[in-house]
Image: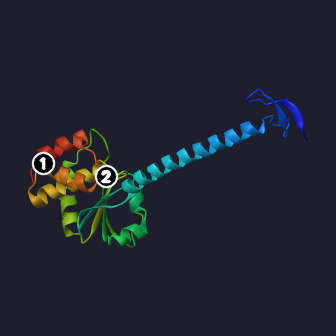
Amino acid sequence: MNNSSLCILCFQASNIKNTDLPVCQSCLNQQAQNLEHFEDEIDKIHQQDQIKQDESSSISEIVPNKLYLGNYIAAKNKKLLQKYKITDILICGDFLKQKFPQDFKYHQIMIQDSLNQSIIEYLDETFNFIDQAQNVFVHCAAGINRSPAIVCAYLMKKNKWNYDKAFEFVKERRSIINKQTNFANQLNLYQY
């Protein structure tokens, strides 16, 4: 049905084909272009987010054929774990689950990402687990604070490094890690 009426977007008199949505063809075309541009922008943002998520959810190789670091998303990806030939998994968290106990040897320390959490008491047992493992994947929830602190402690003891050297070594291999103040303070005092 063709009606000559006012377009609700440009307020020009036009032949409006759809009376439910009184918009002229010119405005419809413009809105379609705007929507297409908006969808392109959303796609770009989604791609950038995917790249960040892929980086944060992937496994980072710290010591080739020995020590790997990541997060819980990677710990739930059996194919990814197998790709890196992971044999042992160290979980740094009190609420994270062992997803594949039939396929990997697990050890779990019940630590929280907290400014009050002591990690010193766990460093000997985590060192021994990592050192005795073949290919070990160390993870916490995000792979940013707890598990990197444990990996740094391992490297400090294994290589007789100070905390700053161990942190920079790990940061070069997993750029998203953080120096959580409480863990950094404890590791600066760590006597191996």
| Marking on residue 190 | 1
In the image, residue 70 above or below residue 185: below
**Identity of the amino acid at label 2?**
Met
Instruction: Bin the neighbour count of mark 2 within 10 Å (Cα to Cα): few under 14, some 14-19, many 20 and up.
Output: few
Q: Earlier in the sequence, mark 1 or mark 2?
A: 2
Quadrant placement of the C terminus: bottom left
**Percent position of residue 163, x then y:** 14, 48
**Percent position of residue 12, x then y:** 78, 28
- The residue indicated by pointer 2 is 110
Give the image quarter of residue 181: top left
Give the image quarter of residue 153: bottom left
**Identity of the amino acid at label 1?**
Tyr
Q: Residue furthest top?
A: 11
Evaluate whether residue 97 shows in this view: no
**SS at mark 1?**
loop
- Taking the image as shown, residue 10 lies to the left or right of residue 15, namely left
Q: Nearer the viewer, residue 52 or 143?
A: 52
Q: Nearer the viewer, residue 60 or 87?
A: 60
Quadrant placement of the N terminus: top right
